[in-house]
Image: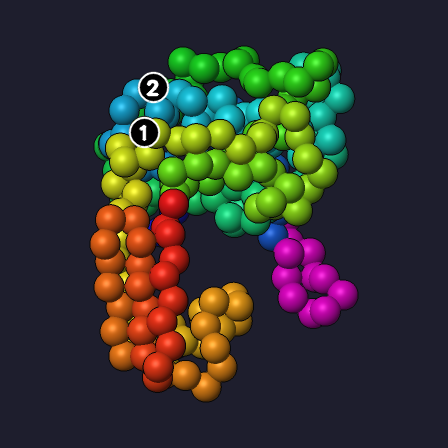
Amino acid sequence: MARYPGTLSVRRSDDGTLALTVTLPFEDYLKGIAEIPPSWPRAALEAQAIAARSYALATTGWEGAEGEPLKTPICATTSCQVYRGIPVPFDPSVRRWFTAVRRTSGQVLLYGDRPADTVYFSTSNGRTYGNDEVFGSAPLPYLRPVVERDDGASPVSHWRVRVPFDDLATFLHEAGEWPPHRTISSVGLEGSTVTVQGGGASRSMDLT
């Protein structure tokens, strides 16, 4: 559960659903952002606060005047930025996030004279991707791919999932890496090379 400071308006959409919009001071909106755990290092929280502030200003029609109402609502999901309000009952660790918002008050990333479109993601696979490769927007010169060497610090940088051989054969076939109608009977890993075998076929792929 959560508390949502501000003024709530409810509007019926053309498709019959209800659209809920909360209007509140900008810095109070940032306090309700829940994109990273508040237990993360202070520097990470402050970097996230600046990125969230910049992204919101870049995508809501802000024209540069202090105190100016933002023209375009911002959604509360991962399609924009996750906004969860103030948790109820209150989680004391959230105060670390509040502190990061307060300590970075007024700090925005700029490109030229406009807030940068600071789209971001949780965890990479050893390299970042251009914004056009992930978000479908026009390429931005400040969001080009780079090698990411410190990603292991993220608690979600390593994960495991079991994929049945039948599903793996389907995935690899769709990617053009495995012949059709061939089952997979074994998968081996040596260094960074994965070898898939089955049905008289064999395929080696370099993970790097």
Q: Give amino acid for label 1.
A: Asp
Q: Secondary structure at mark 2?
A: helix
State which quadrant residue 68 falls in: top right
Callout 2: 10 Å neighbours few (<14), some, many (20+)?
few
Q: Which residue is mark 2?
A: 43
User: Which residue is pictured at 26% across the width and 33% down the height?
Assistant: 153
State which quadrant residue 165 falls in: bottom left
Picture coordinates of residue 191 (x, y %)? 24, 49
Picture coordinates of residue 195 (x, y %)? 31, 63
Q: Give amino acid for label 2.
A: Ala
Q: Secondary structure at mark 1?
A: loop
Query: Colour scheme used in the picture?
Result: rainbow
Residue toward you, 27 or 63: 63
Picture coordinates of residue 179 (x, y %)? 48, 77
Residue toward you, 200 or 36: 200
What is the spatial separation of the Cα atoms under label 1 and label 2, in whole angstroms? 14 Å
1 vs 2, front mark: 1
User: Which residue is pictured at 38% across the width and 45% down the height?
Assistant: 208
Residue 46 at least partly seen: yes
Residue 29 at least partly seen: no
Q: Which residue is mark 1?
A: 150
- Against 127, residue 113 (above or below) is above
Q: How many marks?
A: 2
Tell whether position 91 is magenta.
no
User: Which residue is pictured at 42% across the width and 22% down the height?
Assistant: 47
Residue toward you, 75 or 6: 75
23 sits left or right of 127 in the view: right
134 sits left or right of 99 in the view: right
User: Which residue is pictured at 56% across the width and 17% down the height?
Assistant: 108
Q: Which residues are magenta?
A: 3-19
